[in-house]
Image (tube, rainbow, N blue to C red):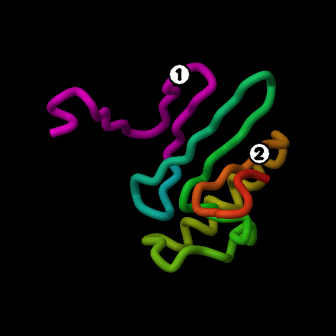
Amino acid sequence: MLKREGKLEVIDGDLEVVPGIRLRHSGGHTRGHQLVEMTSGGETAVHLGDLFPTHFHSNPLWIMAYDNFPMEVIDRKEEYFSHYQLLDSWFTFYHNPLVKAC
């Protein structure tokens, strides 16, 4: 219904939604899992969604019990942590009641 009404766009891969906001296909948690990369003024923040749901999950081996592909989650976290730390990025959370970003 949403797609038929033009309110849903299904994408395959990565997409720059608007300048500075990019969706990147990550997989891992689910086959279609995406992260959101936000850049502005030379700074980057990234929302890894269910790959990095709280600051407690900073250890790549700490995964969620409901991850469909846990070994992929570990691989993606190691890859993304290295990449985004080199950019001195912020990581944002929505599952964390105490820490919203680090």
Boundaries of the magenta span = 1-25
**Element assignment for label 1:** strand
Q: Position of residue 27 (x, y in %)?
A: 48, 56
Marks 2 and 1 in Cβ contact (< 8 Å): no
Q: Position of residue 52 (x, y in %)?
A: 63, 61
Q: Which mark is residue 90?
A: 2
Picture quadrant where residue 19 is located = top right
* Residue type of the residue flagged with mark 1: Val
Residue found 38% across the figure and 39% down from its top: 12
- Which label's residue is closer to the chain start, 2 or 1? 1
Image mark count: 2
Q: Is residue 34 above or below residue 69?
A: above
* Main secondary structure found in the magenta portion: loop
Q: Residues within 10 Å of mark 1 (few under 14, many from 20)?
A: few
Residue 11 or residue 39, whichever sits in front: 39
**Furthest-bottom residue in this view:** 65
| In the displayed structure image, the side of residue 53 where residue 84 appears, left or right | right
Q: Is residue 35 above or below residue 72?
A: above
Distance in Å between CA atoms under marks 2 and 1: 19 Å
Asked if the magenta segment contains residue 63, the reply would be no
Picture quadrant where residue 64 is located = bottom right
Picture quadrant where residue 99 is located = bottom right
| In the displayed structure image, the side of residue 56 where residue 94 appears, left or right | left
Asked if the magenta segment contains residue 22, the reply would be yes
Residue found 49% across the figure and 26% down from its top: 17
* Residue type of the residue flagged with mark 2: Trp
Residue 7 or residue 14, whichever sits in front: 7
Question: To which residue does mark 1 refer?
Answer: 18
Which corner quadrant holds the N terminus? top left
Residue found 74% across the figure and 55% down from its top: 81
Residue 44 or residue 78, whichever sits in front: 44
Residue found 79% across the figure and 22% down from its top: 41
